Image: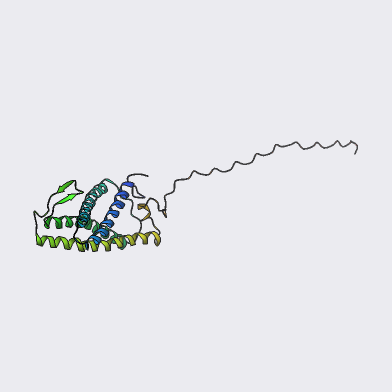
Amino acid sequence: MQFKSDANRWGLGARSLHWLMAALIIGLGVVGLYMADLPNSPQKVKIYALHKSTGLTVLALLLLRLAWRMADRRPDELAMPRWQAAAARAVHLLLYLLMFALPLSGWMYNSASGYPLQWFGLFNLPSLSGGADTALKEIAHAVHEYGFYLLVLLLAAHVGAALKHHFVDRDDTLARMLPLVRRHHATSLPQPLATAPAAPARPPLTPAPAAPPENSPP
């Protein structure tokens, strides 16, 4: 299994970053919805701290993913209508923007609330607002909340399009991002030319029997 991408499929590096970030983002969404209605308690503080640290991890992985995309190649684009290709590019661009906006708005919301921000208790991150700011806090909260809902819609469109390509169009859009899914149009290795069967050996010629002499008795 190769680490870098080639013309036919994404490499292990791109696939690992893709699925790791997908799992973390889905987990952040589920935890975010769960913790919003929790009563104030030490347990809620721990869950919020975990949510913030994981969000910062997604931001760091996004920067790593962009750096890897610049060093790695992209597989060749598959044949599809122009409007589908344009829609796919638009959805990917919006997904990248939201993957930046959500952790940054969460960071800003925490800063404008006047709280310190730590990454898994290991070190502190600087404030983005310079202190408590009520107006900035409300803006950051709105961006974080409504950005999440938009992200859910885009992820649903992204997943739906991938499934449509796999089961309806029957192309390799999804298969070349998943290691265990069989590709519809796998590249086949050149086969050696078949050699013609050898001609059967001809039997040796036997001499014809000699004719009897004319004066020999019957």
- Percent across and percent down for residue 157 are 30, 62
Colouring method of the image: rainbow
Q: Residue furthest right?
A: 217
Q: Residue at x 27, y 62 (%)?
A: 152
Closer to us: 155 or 188: 155
Left or right? Give the position of 68 relative to 193: left
- Percent across and percent down for residue 101 are 19, 57
Rendered view: 204 above or below 109: above
Mark yes or no: residue 191 visible: yes
Q: Residue furthest front?
A: 41
- Percent across and percent down for residue 149 are 24, 63
Q: Quadrant of the C terminus?
A: top right
Closer to us: 91 or 111: 111
Left or right? Give the position of 116 relative to 153: left
- Percent across and percent down for residue 205 are 71, 37
Rendered view: 19 above or below 138: above
